[in-house]
Amino acid sequence: MARYTVALTGGIASGKSEVERRFRALGVHVADADIAAREVVAPGTPGLAEVVQAFGPEALGPDGAMDRAAMRRRVFADADARRRLEAIIHPRVRAALRAACEAAPGPYAIAAIPLYAEAGADAYAPWVDRVLVVDVPVELQLARLLKRDGIDEALAWKMIRAQATRERRLAVADDVIENDGPLEALDAEVARLHGRYLYLAEEAQGSRATFR
């Protein structure tokens, strides 16, 4: 059971997945909010039923699953719709992430939470011990998003501006990975932080044992 949890966050197209992959390769359990967000609105779940109640049957695709592309277009064009959808999904995701991290093997676990800064630290304070931010300049973020998703620039800017600013994310960071260079540079950064988190997890375990 993990005794220490690190929140991994960053803006869209910042390279969180690459950082996450490297931690996994080191044997660290990673609970991913994007995966949890799909699971909590999978067909047959109360989450999906609530989405349909809030947005109507047009929220569904032909297969009965949530039409993620259509909902993305809808919520990025309508801030109220985005807040309604987040109010359905986010509490369920937070609960799933906490349970996964608390049950994880190893000294520490990582919760990959793209919208950590948007939710506010208080939403995760009871169980997140440290925050790691993957940071890139906004111009590079935009270029990567356009290349990755094949969308137009107007939608890309809406997606970026719907998230917390770069400054706001950095304000909640305990650790920062600057991901504006080659991907190979991430290897050394992740290895360095892995060593730090192992030490902090051991230290936290000692402190908790002292106060039992």
Image (cartoon, grey):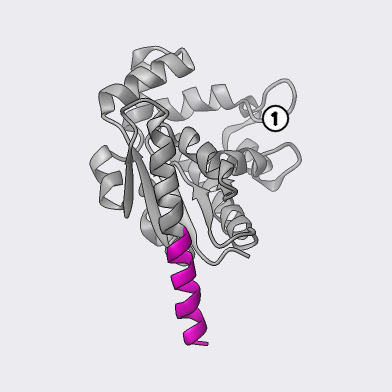
Q: Locate residue 190: give its quadrant.
A: top left
Q: Which residue corresponds to the image point at 47% horizontal and 46% vertical from the top-left?
A: 113
The residue closer to the viewer here, 49 or 16, is 16
Q: Would you say residue 117 sits in the magenta stretch? A: no
Q: Which residue corresponds to the image point at 34% horizontal and 33% vertical from the top-left?
A: 179
Which secondary structure class fits the magenta region best?
Answer: helix
- Magenta highlight range: 198-212
Count of numbered badges drawn on the protein: 1
The residue closer to the viewer here, 161 or 46, is 161
Q: Would you say residue 206 sits in the magenta stretch? A: yes
* Quadrant of the rendering where the N terminus is positioned: bottom right
Q: Which residue corresponds to the image point at 26% horizontal and 29% vertical from the top-left?
A: 137
In the image, residue 117 sits, relative to residue 186, either above or below, namely below
Q: Which residue corresponds to the image point at 47% horizontal and 17% vertical from the top-left?
A: 149
x, y percent for residue 199: 44, 64
Residue 157 shows in this picture: no
The residue closer to the viewer here, 27 or 121, is 27
Indicate the amino acid at tag 1. Ala
Q: Secondary structure at mark 1?
A: loop
Identify residue for label 1: 65
Query: Is residue 90 found left or right of 132 in the rendered image?
Result: right
x, y percent for residue 45: 72, 44
x, y percent for residue 11: 37, 35
Q: Locate residue 98: give its quadrant.
A: bottom right
Q: Residues within 10 Å of mark 1 (few under 14, many from 20)?
A: some
x, y percent for residue 194: 46, 51
Residue 67 shows in this picture: yes
In the image, residue 4 sits, relative to residue 143, either above or below, namely below
